[in-house]
Amino acid sequence: MKLQRVRAVALKETRHLLRDPGSLAMMVLMPVMLLFIFGYAIRLDVLEAPIGVFQEATDGVSGELTAHLDASRAFRVSARYDNRRALGDALQAGHIWAGIVIPHDFARELARGDARIQLLLDGVDANTARLLRNYARTMIGEYALRQGAARPPLVLEERVWFNEARESRYAILPGVIALVMAVMGALMTSLTIAREMELGNLVMLCTTPLSRTEFLCGKLAPYLLIGLLDVLVAAFVTTTLFDVPLRGSLLALVSVSTLFLLVVLMQGALISMVAGNQMLASQMAMVSTFLPALLLSGFVFAVQNMPRLLEYITYAVPARYYVTLCKAIFLKGVGPLLLWTEVVALVAVLLLLAIATVRRAARLGLLP
Amino acid sequence: MIALLAESAIRLRALFRKEFRQLLRDPRMRFFVVVPPLIQLLVFGYAASYDVRRADIGVVDPVRSEQTRALLGAVTADGTFTAFAFADMRDAARAIDRGTVRAVLHFSPGFDHDQRVQLIADGSDSNSALMIVGQLAQSLQRAAGATAPIAIEERAWFNPNLEDRWFFVPGIIATVLLISTSMLIAMAVVREREIGTLERMMVTPVARIEFLLGKIAPVVCIGIFDVALVCVVAVFWFEVPMRCTVWSLTVATLLYLASTLGIGLLISSFVVTQQQAVLWMFFVTMPMILLSGFAFPIANMPEPAQWFAAINPLSHFLYVLRDMFLKGGGIADHAMRFAAMAALGLGAVAVSALRLR
C-alpha cells in the first residue's frame, strides 16, 4: 500500500466534495438541524394537557378537586361539561385529552374514606395517555392526603440519577449524535463507489497501479474527516446551546466516535459495492443503517422495553453500542474503560466489515 | 384534437412501459419495493414502545427482614421487574453506570423503624425512568398495605390496553409513503439528468407533461401497493383495528401522494447529481417526519414548530390516518384536513411542473 496513491484518491474525492459547496454545507449543517429539532421541539413529557371535567354535584369538595388538578403543571382544565355525553363527544373530537367524572356523592364518600372517580383517556396516543394517567394518580393521591386521608405506609424518596430535572432532552440529545453519524457516514459513502461504478470510471481505474485497499482508504478518508467535524459541532451545540452536561472527557467521545465512524463508513462502502447503482444504494443504506440507528439503538425507544427476540437482534446493530457509549460519556461521566464490552463489540464489527469489504472489493477488478 | 390526444396516448404508453421496466428490471429493486416497508412495519410494531414491560432492577437490602423480603416479592410478582441483589450502594451505582440495571431499590439500614426506601432510576432514558419509578412506588405502597382513599376507575377509549403499536402502525403508512415515493421519483428524474438521457428525451416529441406522467405512474402504483401491503399486515398480523372505509383511506392516500410526489419532483428540479438528491431528501424529510407528530406529540412543541405542522402534509395525513383507523372517522369529519392536503399536494405538483423545464 502506497500512501501517495491513497492521497491521490483522497484528494480527488475531496475536490469532488468541495466542488459542490451546497452539499458540503448540508453535511455539516445536518447535525445542527437535527439537534435543534430534538433539542427545542421534541418533548416526551406532558405540559398543560387540556382535560375536561364533569362534576355531577356542584359542591365545594368536587370543586376543590378540580382546582387542585388545574393547578398542576401537567393539566389544564380547559372545559367543564354538564353531562357525560358532552364530555364523551369532546374526547372523541380530540378537544380534550382526558376527562374526569366526579360523581354526585363524592363529598360524602370521601368523608367515609371510599370515594371513587372516573378517568377517561384518549388512548390514541398511548404514551401520552399513560403519562396523564400517572400524573392523575399522583395528583389525586396528593389531594386525598390533604383531605386528611391516611399517609401511605412507606416513605419513598424518588431520585432520577444523571437527569435530576427529568428533562427528556438530556436523555435524547447524546443519541442524536449517533443518528447523525449513521446517516452521514453510511448514506454518503454508500453513494460514492456506486457512482463510480454507474459512470464507468471504475473500469478506467483498473488500468492504473491503484490497489483496492488504496482505493478504499482514499475514498473513505474525506468522509471520516467530515464525520469527525460533525461530532465536534454536535458536541459543541449539545453542551453550549442545550446545556446538556458533558461529564466524561472529550477525548473519550472523539475516540469512540472515530471507531463508530469507521464502522459506518465500511458499512457504506460495502453497501455501495453490493448495490452497484446509486438509487438502490441509497435505499439499502436507509434501511440498513438509518432505521436501525433510529429504532433499534436505544436512542428513543429503550432496548430493554422490546420483545426478547428483537433485543437479541439489536446486538447486531453497531449504533446500539455507540448510543450506550455516548449516553454514558455525556450523562454518567464514565469512560470507555468501564464499558469495554461495548468497545470490544464495535471493534469486532469493524473487523468483520473490513474483511467483508476488502473481499467484496476483489470483484471491482482493481489490483489486490 | 382527437388525433393529437391519440398520438399522445401512444407516447404515454411507450413511456409507461419504459419507466415500469426501468424501475422493476433489477430484482434487487423489486425486493426493495416490498421488503423495506415490511421491515419498517415490523420493527415499529415491535420495537417502538415507550411502555416498560420488563426491567432489571438492583436491590440493596442491608436489613433483610421479613418485611423487606415480602415487599421485594410483591414488586417482582407480576414479572415486570427482575431483582438482582447488591451488597452496597457502590456496587449498585456501578451497575447503573454500566447499564446492567435500570433502577435500584435501596432500603434504609433502619428500615424497621423509619420505613424509608430510596428509589433510584437511570435518567439517561428519562421516559422509562419515570415509568419505572411510578410503577415501583405504586406496587411498594400497595404491598405495604396502602389503600387508595380515592379509587380511580380508569378507561382508555379507542385503545383500551394502551398499546403503543396502535399509535405507531397507522403512522407507518405515512412515513413509508413519504420516504419511498418521493425518493424514487426524485432519483428517477435526476438519474436521467446525470446520465444525460434527459437531453436526449428533449429532442423527442415527448411533451413535458407526458414525461412527468410517465415518471409518476409507476411510483403511484408502488405507493398504492405499499399502502395495501402495510394495511394488510397491520390489520391481520398486528390486529390494529381499521374502523374506517377503504374508500376514505384511498382518497386520503391519493391526496397525500400528490404532496410526496410534488416534494420529490421539486427536489429533482434543482439538484444535479443523485448524491445531492439523497442529501436534500434527507434534509427535507427528516424535519417533516420528526415534527409531524409521528413519534412525538405536536401539542408539546413550541409555536413555530406547530406552524410548520400546519403546512406539513405528513402531519395532516397522520392525524387523519389515526383518527380513521382508531376512531372510525371519515372524510366529512376532517374536511379541513383533506382540503389542506389537497391544496398542499396540488401546489407542490404545480410548482415542480413549472420548474422542471
Image (cartoon, coloured by chain):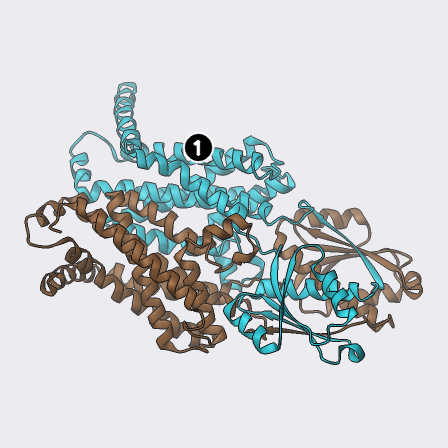
Chain colours: A brown, B cyan
Q: Residues within 10 Å of mark 1 (few under 14, many from 20)?
A: some
Q: Position of residue A11 (x, y in %)?
A: 14, 63
Q: Position of residue A359 (x, y in %)?
A: 22, 49
- Residue shown at 21%/63% (left/top)? A221
Marked residue chain, label 1: B
Taking B346 as reference, is B145 left or right?
right
Along the line of sight, the residue nearer the viewer: A153 or B339: A153
- Residue shown at 74%/48% (left/top)? A88
Q: Position of residue A120 (x, y in %)?
A: 74, 52
- The answer to whether residue A124 of the structure is visible from this angle is yes
Along the line of sight, the residue nearer the viewer: B161 or A350: A350
Q: Position of residue A63 (x, y in %)?
A: 83, 65
Secondary structure beneath dot 1 equals helix
- Residue shown at 26%/59% (left/top)? A23
Along the line of sight, the residue nearer the viewer: A202 or B22: A202
Q: Quadrant of residue B24?
A: top left
- Residue shown at 44%/41% (left/top)? B37
Q: Which residue is mark 1?
A: B225
Q: In the picture shown, does residue B61 fall above or below B233?
A: below
In the picture, the quarter occupied by the N terminus of chain B is top left
Taking A161 as reference, is B224 left or right?
left
Along the line of sight, the residue nearer the viewer: B169 or A7: A7
- The answer to whether residue A185 of the structure is visible from this angle is no
* Residue type highlighted by circle 1: Phe
Please count the marks in the image: 1
In the picture, the quarter occupied by the C terminus of chain B is top left
